[in-house]
Amino acid sequence: MHLFQGDPGNSLQGFSCSCQGSGRLSLQLDLISQLLHFASRLLGQRLFEKLMKMTFYGQFVAGEDQESIQPMIRRNRAFGVGSILDYGVEEDLSTEEAERQEMESCTSVAEREGGGPSKREKQYQAHQAFGDRRDGVVSARTYFYTNEAKCDGHMETFLRCIEASAGASDDGFSAIKLTALGRPQFLLQLSDVLIKWRRFFHQIAAEQGKAGLAALDTKLEVVALQESMAKMGIASRKEMEDWFTAETLGVSSTLDLLDWNSLIDSRTELSKHLVVPNMQTGQLEPLLSGFTEEEQQQMARMLQRMDVLAKKAAKVGVRLMVDAEQTYFQPAISRLTLEMQRKFNVDKPLIFNTYQCYLKDAYDNVTLDVELARREGWCFGAKLVRGAYMAQERARAVEIGYEDPINPTYEATNTMYHRCLSYVLEELKNNARAEVMVASHNEDTVRFTLRRMEELGLHPADRQVYFGQLLGMCDQISFPLGQAGFPVYKYVPYGPVMEVLPYLSRRALENSSIMKGALRERQLLWQELKRRLCTGSLFSRPA
């Protein structure tokens, strides 16, 4: 997992990359990994581990186990900085093994035995060329499905991290990845279904002359919608009378995307959601001919593991952040996270969804979820990141042939991040039960957040706005914020030296761009904090 997912400070890294950028990054990572392993053989494991703890490992990893990391946690806490613990051990698979595991785990029995073309759109199918999801990814950990026992092992690791986070901070966080908890096949299938349902909504909107509007501003005329659905044979008049009631629509003669989603929920519960509208025949068709009994059990266990983790987090008082992943998994990840939020975010935000602001649809995703939380009465919790998979996403879109989901420039992503953040901060002003984690290494974003908090009267002591950076990186941001009274956290990996080498390889590559300009960032941030301290605006509440 990765808390901050590809936020390279002010660097233009990645946005100038061509579609070959993913391959170049992988070559660099391979080279670093080979150098580390060569040094281990040359020096011997004992001397190598001692040297690493004095240098690179000591910079980015807190220690080998939960006991040895306590001095680091106490030292951070003394400066007002909390800790988000993560067991940083990763599998060191070959590219060939990763591709084999991915292709097997992303394809259902029905697809393998059917022989015909998949009913899923090509974006939501597994592709051999992109089977190794580590390719081009510097800032995030990748999990590959092996078997159910391995998923149970990942769950146990997450449980230990939740327990450790509870002991490390009074207001702790922990992070999980859903690809660690089950077969990615189910995430692909559910994502495909959810996107087709949304496109169905927007197609009808276009027929009603409402194309191109923001997601929350798009409203369908109910009478015209009923006529369209009847013509397509999707539902009988009687069924539509049951759907479109005063209870579901109120007095309105229109419905928006959230109303539409609630109707779909009542029409087909999540467990029955794997059906899609065929736009040619107008019929609801099963995405696949059906799951095997084993696949049904696997999907159920994935949901059970999520529930176990959320209940544990609730019991020990730790907020659970669900990491964002690739766009072909993300609709399902967000939907499953939403189901957890409905259940557990009753009194306060326990479950935090992650929004990747390098995506073109990031603002729509944020605004829809904020509005849904308002309507349903649960507490909104969000982590905002820029994103970790840009080079891979762009290469995949070009190779397979679908629209690039990423914003065209770095500046566009910055604008999107600040637009989403500003919207969420305004929600926090009006809703004391909403919270956000600003997970960024970008000093401009930190200053933007401080300025907007001051403008909106959001006080750091209210602990609605959290900041976070990686251990060993951007200390010039984290520690001044902590000393000034802002809730700030360090993502703290731990684990045996030889078993965290894949993590250290990524940190070596990522850190080269972030450390440039660190002195300048420190000076600018201190100037901003000192100005607020001198004017009394840092801690003063509005009259």
Image (cartoon, helix red, strand yellow):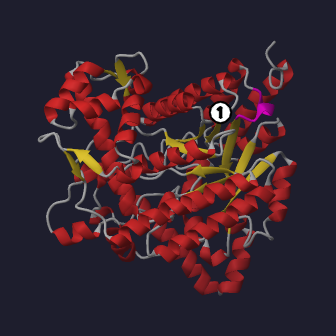
Residue at the spot 81% in from the left edge and 12% down from the top edge:
543
Q: Residue furthest left?
A: 280
Q: Which residues are magenta?
A: 459-464
Name the amino acid, label 1.
Ala
Q: Estimate the x, y position of residue 386 in percent, counting from the top left.
A: 51, 42
Circle 1 sits in a helix, a strand or a loop, which is it?
loop
Question: How far across and down, in percent of the image, does residue 273 sit?
Answer: 34, 49
The percent coordinates of residue 72 (x first, y second) are 81, 60
**Residue 128 sits in which quadrant?**
bottom left
Q: Is residue 463 magenta?
A: yes
Residue displayed at 85% across by 57% down: 74
535 w.r.t. 323: above or below: above
Q: Which residue is mark 1?
A: 434
Q: Is residue 391 above or below residue 482?
A: below
Q: Examine the structure image and report whether residue 305 is included in the region drawn in magenta.
A: no
For label 1, the crowd category at 10 Å Cα-Cα, with few meaning under 14, some 14 to 19 and many 20 or more, is many
Q: Nearer the viewer, residue 383 or 47?
A: 383
Report x, y in % for residue 381.
Answer: 61, 39
Question: Residue 361's image quarter?
Answer: top left
